[in-house]
Image: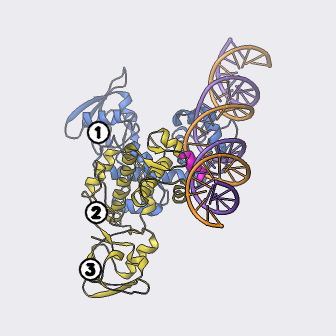
Chain colours: A yellow, B blue, C purple, D orange
Amino acid sequence: MHSFTEENYLKAIYKLQETNGEVVATSVLAQVMGVHAPSVTDMLKRIAGKKLVTYQKSKGVKLTERGRQVAVAIIRNHRLWEVFLVDKLGFKWDEVHELAEQLEHIHSEDLTNKLDKFLGFPKADPHGDPIPDANGVLPKSNAVLVSSLKVGEEGTFTGVTDHTPAFLNYLDKTGISLGSCLKVKSIEEFDQTFTLQLKPKREVVVSHKVANSLLVG
Amino acid sequence: MHSFTEENYLKAIYKLQETNGEVVATSVLAQVMGVHAPSVTDMLKRIAGKKLVTYQKSKGVKLTERGRQVAVAIIRNHRLWEVFLVDKLGFKWDEVHELAEQLEHIHSEDLTNKLDKFLGFPKADPHGDPIPDANGVLPKSNAVLVSSLKVGEEGTFTGVTDHTPAFLNYLDKTGISLGSCLKVKSIEEFDQTFTLQLKPKREVVVSHKVANSLLVG
DNA sequence: AAAATAAATTAGATTAACCTAAATATATTA
DNA sequence: TAATATATTTAGGTTAATCTAATTTATTTT
């Protein structure tokens, strides 16, 4: 099969294609993988040889359909294990990423599907990220960033775009949790600070950075 | 930390020390690790450098206390994951070894202990192998091989020494399962075939090879 | 368009984990 | 004990994944 490292590159390319567009640059990959550019060039040649990506010198990479399938399978594993760690073992949502990074590389369709069933076929992980189904299909979400809402608009908090423990802890402390109903009361002209109305009638003031990391749907 | 490979050597050395005595030979390790002897010599030098084993040229290896701790921690992980796979996910006892071989290398005391708790602090894995506690202490067992019993002696089937799917399937088919009460009805002089009385009043005839792979306690 | 800057690649090393072939050490047996 | 056989190690090579330094390619800026 593929090495952990190869799989991590595929995952990174997948995520970069999702957010930054079709083609991924060597330097960007080097950045997110925490390695230097020549290492990326090496790896791209290797995985291009395995038909997992299409790669043209100095022009960036794209996943092939096979590469996409591998990446999505790993993401499915990752998110299912996160659900397991939180729902069954009692980890907090800011503690599970690193462990899931390891668990995700254990390849067994049987294991993945049994885990899925054991967890009750969850649709999203503890951070609200959608879990691909057994065929690698991701439910496409209609979630939008709170930062894109206008005054008076509202939605249910369904996910985050920042997965750092620091941010997740901030949300815990502030009492903003998945499923909360958020309504934009006002937006400060000067610095785009948002005042949000939470569930019953609490109000919280959050920076634009925060509003830009919260998804509602 | 240590690489998966290093950990697998430590585990192998641990198991060989348990069964074959104090010191482990290069060739035996090569055999069980499925590699050639010079690879073992290489690795022994490496892990000796890390103080995980004591190694003297051409005289074999022993685990240090540190090495033993690492090995036992991995065995604890392995057996806990096996319990999880069988009890929670519904795998059969002959299907879990390979998966547990992968899961065992995920190091997190927190994960291990939460898993242990989730599983109800099991004392043994699905094959009856004892699970080391959080301090690396293995309950020392008083189990004996059925092959060592005399006619008329009996015991509760508590474990196997052969973990191959082939053998485990044979037991399933024959109806010998963990917890069964086994009594030796007779032993054939000629080839040491055992006739065993099972639970209510069934009788099964098993070869010496089988009697030598069943533990009762 | 030429020059300057930035990005990407090539060249050449390193480390872990393996290999084969050759050499040495240990154990066995005549 | 000498001769043979077996076990182990050394020597030298390979691949995956990384690195640094140097070079080449692409993009900006003047």
Task: Point out residue B145 in the picture as x, y percentages from the top left corner.
Answer: 40, 38
Residue at x 41%, y 79% (from the top left corner): A208
Three-letter residue code for mark 1: Leu
Kindly report the distance in space between the C-alpha atoms of the residues bearing marks 2 and 1.
59 Å
Residue at image point 39% right, 81% down: A173
Q: What's under tag 3, amino acid-wise?
A: Glu
Q: Measure the alpha-carbon separation of dots 3 and 1.
A: 72 Å
**Which residue is drawn at the image coordinates 36% and 51% (left, top)?**
A72
Residue occupied by mark 2: A141
Which of discs 2 and 1 lies nearer the camera? The answer is: 2
Characterize the local packing of mark 3: few (<14), some (14-19) or many (20 or more) Cα atoms within 10 angstroms. Answer: few
**Who is closer to the viewer here, A74 or C6?**
C6
Q: Chain of mark 3?
A: A
Tag 2–tag 1 contact (CB < 8 Å): no
Quadrant of res A205 = bottom left
Residue B139 in view (yes/no): no
